[in-house]
Image (cartoon, rainbow, N blue to C red):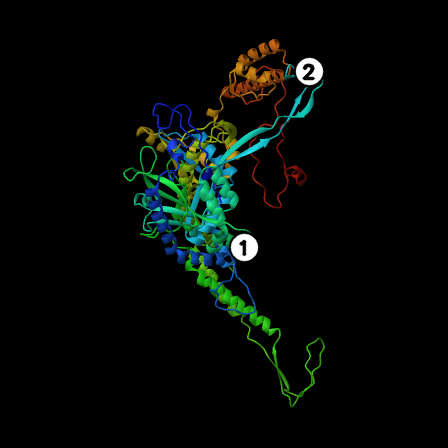
Amino acid sequence: MSDAALAIEVEPEVGGNPGDDGGEEVTRAGTSHRDRDLLAGRAGQLRDKLDEIFSAVMRVFEEQKDRSDDIEDYWDCFNCRTNHRQYYSGIANIYFPIIHDAVVARSTRFSNQIFPQSGRYIEAVSADGTQPQSLIGLLEHYLRETHFEILVLKPLCETGDIEGHYNLYVDWCELEREIVSRETHGPRVRLGGEEVEAPGEDFEDMAEPEIIVEGRPVFEVLHDSDVAVWPANVDSLDEAFANGGGVAIVRHWTKAKIDQLVEQGCIRKAEGKALKDSMDRVSRENTDIEKRLAEHVGIHPRGTGATVWEVWITLPLNDGGGFDEDGRNRLCRVFFGPNRAQLGAKRNPYWNDRCPLISFPVKKTPGVFKGKSLISYVDSMQYEANDAINEGADAATLSAAPIVLRDPEKSNGPLVFGVGAIWDGGKDAISLLTFPDLTPRAQTRVQMALQGIFQSLGVNPSMLPQQTRAGKPNQAQVAQEQAVDLLTTAEAVKVLAVIASEMLGLIVDYDYQFRDTDITIREFGEMGVRARLEQVPPLTNRRGLSFIWRGAEQVKQTMMMQQAGTAWVNVLQNPQIQQQLAREGYSLHLAPVLVAQNQNIFGAFLGSQVIVNDREMLTMDPELENEILETGQMLHVHPLDEDPKHLQSHMKAKQETGDPHGTIGQHIAAHIQSMQMKMAASMQKAQAGAGMRPGLPPPGAGGPRPGAQPAPPHGPQRPPGALHPDRAAMSGVVQMPRRT
């Protein structure tokens, strides 16, 4: 669980008292009012209102109790745990993982579609129509650093399928690291209270530790049982706030977490101490779904914890940031503890004034905010498959030890099971009762349940690691399955794409608010630019920008390109089409299409080296190159450099500085080689323009003799048994004399 956003430290104001309008200095939270404790002083009216809000929160969680109980049963289906809904109870305890395999197949396919192979899945358009490449690179950097695909997206997909609702909480956290590095220096002595470097041989030493603060967004996938939204008939969180409702999130804190939040001012000190004293009793009264899921993977948490409700609600505040019944409604965050305890209340600490929770149903039901679980349609078939396979397994087990019938009048000796055992008895004195073989019927029942579950959840054979069909599919069947899979997956991931787009806006807002230093990112740029590292300063918030997650559309576009895109590109290259476009004021630019398809095939890194944008290959001033070369860094010669001009500048710099590192001399040699290559290419181009083949000397000049020359094709092949021309004279055939 991420509570980093609950620990926002507010810097004190500089220059001016709170409430002054003349200063430009603001606190870290944007204004001083955002850090004001609303429960401080005489807050009787506010406490009465918060008590009513807490009653509403408890009522909402009580209304969705049946839904929470069903969700626990659906998690049992995914984790292959038997529960009270299983009808058959016998010797065997086998759980056939149909729902588990279907949900995992869906999450794998959805994550691959959201994050395509090309590595380009974010589009940001500014108000002037340009794409801010630095901002796109920054967002991709954060997603790589947080391992968003494997730690957030896949659990979000699985949780949405099982619970019927996506809940993603976006925070910001900062972590301090003490970095130690090595340095090489000479002997140091202290003179006059200062440490100076003395003559002597250099040696390796440990440098002073450096404190580095790393900030990044953090994501938390919330369980739907821990999230309550009221009114229940709204379509979005903003509509809930506008209608006087709110959002409540269940939190589970330890004593160390409570101490941390008290120290950072998120909850009041006295209320925090009372909360720690009541933790033992509170932990036994509330159900923790996260703790139950941890037990499913073999982890049994020990100790006690406190259940806290984080509530986002609008409260009327005056211009000074205090509670006022006649004030304007502002989004606030309130923490409630057990026994209706009011732990803390402050205005929304984020500058964007948005709730950090992104909540969408998997399938929207008109008039209801939350969605219905997909497992609710197929859980009965999962229980049927389990009963069938357990009944068949029990029948097979009991058949291994059949019931023995013995006629006491014909056989009264002992009947001992063993290899080579001999039983005394007459004819028909002993008989065995064998149980019927239920395996074929169990296989049929399991196969029917598997097909029904896969059909309801939209799982086709192309999404599974192994094919389940009996025969080998033909090419038409494979193409049809791929087309169906593409359309169904593209439709299913639309909600995830909307969530990702909303998440990008929150990340940009948090980066603008919390990051104060430059950050080094890997940036690919636009239209096939080679990957490079770039220092990105704190940029801006989302104002004037539109973020779109394009990863879900790239796979669909790639398939369409394979089917009809190539043929359409050929049509566009028709001269008549281009002339018609020119007459109507249009021009044809195929580079974006080719670059996009190239990166979809080879990826952003390799694709940027296959198709290179020459507009980005700009030359560098020779004087600036001299400054870099004098520091000992090597530079490559640019193809567009003016070699004579650069050589003149570099040779002058070499004479003045002496070239202590030798880098200027190496750069001069590279320029000479580049100039020779350009001259050779120019000569070949001139020869080609004069009608001569490249590589041949001009007329009248000596040189090597030409090699093989083009010749007409040989005559047709002679029929079988035909006489070879060289043997024709031996057969009396008169031949024409050969040319010598």
Quarter-of-image position of residue 594: top left
Q: Which mark is residue 197?
A: none
How many discs mark residues in the rendered view? Answer: 2
Kindly identify which residue carries mark 1: 295
Kindly identify which residue carries mark 2: 198
Residue in the foreground of this view, choosing between 32 and 248: 32
Residue 104 picture location, percent across and down: 50, 52
SS under mark 1: helix
SS under mark 2: loop
Neighbour class for label 1 at 10 Å: few (<14), some, many (≥20)? Answer: few
Asked if one can make out residue 152 in the rendered structure from this viewpoint, the answer is yes
Residue in the foreground of this view, choosing between 317 and 519: 317
Q: Amino acid at mark 1?
A: Glu
Q: Residue at x 62, y 73 (%)?
A: 400
Sequence-first disc among 2 and 1: 2
Q: Amino acid at mark 2?
A: Ala
Above or below — where is 203 with respect to 527?
A: above
User: Quick check: 424 left or right of 664?
Assistant: right
Residue in the foreground of this view, choosing between 474 and 413: 413
Residue 702 picture location, percent across and down: 62, 16
Extreme residue in the front direction = 42
Above or below — where is 733 with respect to 391?
A: above
